[in-house]
Amino acid sequence: MASRRKSRELALQMLFQCDLGKHTPAHVISTFLQAQRVDPEVKSFARELFEGTLADIEALDRLVSEQAANWRLERMAAVDRNLLRVALYELLHHPETPPAVVIDEAIEIARRFSGEDSVDFVNGVLDGIRKSLVAVKAKEIPAPRSEA
């Protein structure tokens, strides 16, 4: 099976290029992603994460801002900000991937691309949002009716 971690790393790198380099998504895909020598499955999932994250970025940023109350998005390290975005996109739009896996993958990617302080920060933000999402879903499920 293709490496989903590699897809996540590529998506992070593409988001970083859009965020800091101010490149268009089309430019990043054509110059960066197409140049990668990886399985087509890896490219496909990376592109889906990248494009999906960009399409949902306002909602994702709102979730991050609510959870990291003392941190403004623009003050976060660019790697951390974009890693949180892509991981949250996957949490919200890929229910087939267990939340613990998404968070663990984000932590490992933070170790590779950011600093040790980032590991705790990314873990705390993602786990806090995961718990919030679980609480919201629990409220949406109606209580079972008792049969008399």
Image: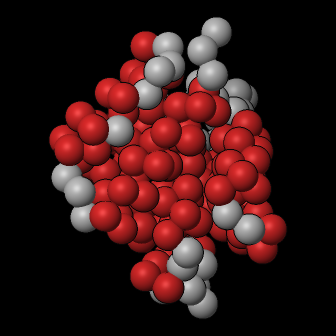
- Rendering quarter of residue 16: bottom left
Residue 10: horizontal and vertical position, in percent? 49, 39
Query: Visible in this render: residue 108?
Result: yes
Q: Residue furthest bottom?
A: 70
Residue 124: horizontal and vertical position, in percent? 74, 67
Q: Is residue 61 above or below residue 88?
A: below
**Front in this rendered view, residue 5 or 131:** 5
In the displayed structure image, the side of residue 89 where residue 57 appears, left or right = left
Query: Visible in this render: residue 56?
Result: no
**Front in this rendered view, residue 91 or 35:** 35
Query: In percent of the image, x 35 and y 39: which residue is there?
Result: 32
In the displayed structure image, the side of residue 111 where residue 64 appears, left or right = left
Residue 20: horizontal and vertical position, in percent? 36, 68
Rendered image coloring scheme: secondary structure
**Front in this rendered view, residue 12 or 122:** 12
Q: Residue furthest top?
A: 1
Q: Quadrant of the C terminus?
A: top right
- Rendering quarter of residue 71: bottom right
Query: In percent of the image, x 39 and y 47: which residue is there?
Result: 14
Q: Quadrant of the N terminus?
A: top right
Residue 41: horizontal and vertical position, in percent? 47, 15
- Rendering quarter of residue 52: top left
Query: In percent of the image, x 23 and y 34: which residue is there?
Result: 30
Q: Is residue 53 above or below residue 126?
A: above
Q: Is residue 130 above or below residue 94?
A: below
Q: How many marks?
A: 0
Query: In percent of the image, x 19 and y 41: which residue is there?
Result: 26
